[in-house]
Amino acid sequence: MNHSISLTVNGARRDFVLDDPRVTLLDLLRERLHLTGTKKGCDRGQCGACTILVDGKRINSCLALAISHDGADILTIEGVARGDQLHPVQAAFIAHDGFQCGFCTPGQVMSAIGMMREGQAGNDPERIRECMSGNLCRCGAYAGIVDAVLDAQGRMDESDQRRSA
Amino acid sequence: MKPFDYVRPATVSDAVAAAAQSGAVYLAAGTNLLDLMKGGVSRPDRLVDVTHLDGLDGIERLADGSLRIGALVSNADLAHDADFARSYPAVAEALLSGASAQLRNAATVGGNLLQRTRCAYFYDTASRCNKREAGSGCDARGGENRTHAVLGWSDSCIATHPSDFCVPLVALDAIVEIEGRGGRREIALDELHRLPGDTPERESVLEPGDLIVAVRLPPAAREFAPHARYLKVRERTSYAFAVVSAAAALRIENGKIAEARLALGGVAAKPWRARAAEDVLKGVAPTADAFQEAAWRALTDAKPSGDNAFKIELARRIVVRALTLAAAGTPARLSALPASPFASTSGAIHA
């Protein structure tokens, strides 16, 4: 039996016909839309490489059935930069060597953006490590990742203050 | 993953009818179920998706002072609800000590209660497991079992229930609202999960089609807010299941404990309410000696199920420490590392 769903992916509406309900959001993004920035690491919700924002919240796309998310608004790593202008979190990862091989980086960046929206970490490195614990980095770039997130958090706080001033 | 039929009912009663059929299971966020299905541990014929049902995602204060939490409220939304965290700080701390931020954003209240054990032999389809396949045997008994049960286990099964959330909930007398083929009913959370006995494949008292629609905290649960903690020892400081955990909540009047609540996690196939220990604490001063006595009472019936005798002594110490922290008072700010005995600095404000 075919199922029709629509999603908003990085601002554009996309319609799909699913001939099998087993497809996850992760596989839909990678195989149907060829948005391969979202990575398949463990495929079991343990590594965080597949992190995306769904309706503004970070989740593991490998553990989400696409069919159950009909109508959802999805943001992936491909949708965070504005043209050639990197998202502040992306820029901070480069500035602080927040990666080595880069495989976990899209998930780390999406998780950091989601974490900042949650507003639960602030500028406390211990809180950042705790709130980013769902993203593994096999190269062990954690020190750079925490520095990058702290820096990006600070820049975004400043830009918020400028806006509200 | 085995193929399955997918149905998305429009109402709770349609959902109950669809899920009452053999081989059907409910799908909420799926953070545990999909993992089990990918591993071939769960092989349902039909998924009944309840995520689009109306009216199951609210947090509501009732006229009598109870709090009613819809089964589809996410773990993160509940933990970060300011009134909830202020009124039930140990529950918020337990929620935030579980899983990762991504999983907490997706995972639901109802799903948390019904998550399956993380026993490695249950997950490994090449191993014998009475819970996965009734009557097949238990490879955990002679295997790597240092994290397994020390209370309420049987020769058939030594698995533990992995939830953090359930531990303070059961201490606070939480009630589970269930919609089933016979209509609406409610049971104490303490009665939801079954001990294994000879039938470890039956993990709860739920019947086919039964849908958890809400969890309720009774009015008295708020009275413990000034003295309530959840403490969890795990093998990593974050993103790990409990080796042992404890929820302690005290009502202190005129320097004496008017009422105590205590429950343990990671020790049994259900969240373990320690009523005998609570009785010891009633009417006495909150002293180290009293907490030691309570810890002994809580673990009187404990026995190792394998290489896990250390968990009994660990549980006693966690009980004493959780009670000591609760007596000192709920901190104004949640610890930076929720429920961790290694937490140093302050984190998010409780309220």
Image (cartoon, rainbow, N blue to C red):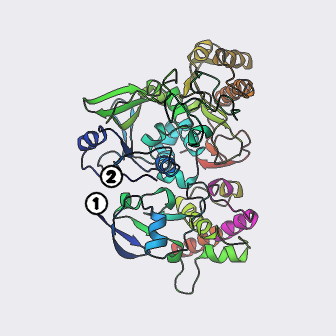
**Residues marked 1 and 2, same chain:** no
Q: Position of residue B348 (x, y in %)?
A: 60, 50
* Dot 1 alpha-carbon crowd within 10 angstroms: few under 14, some 14 to 19, many 20 or more: few
Residue B79 horizontal side relative to residue B62, left or right: right
Q: Can the viewer see residue B128?
A: yes
Q: Is residue A16 magenta?
A: no
Mark 1 touches mark 2? (CB < 8 Å): yes
Mark 1 to mark 2 CA distance (whole Å): 8 Å
Q: Position of residue B81 (x, y in %)?
A: 47, 47
Q: Could you tell me which secondary element the residue under label 1 belongs to?
A: loop
Number of the label disc, if any, that sits on residue B5: 2
B184, above or below B49, in the image: above
- Specify the subunit that label 1 lies on: A
Q: Can the viewer see residue A60?
A: no
Q: Nearer the viewer, residue A25 or A52?
A: A25
What residue sits right under mark 1 in the picture? A1
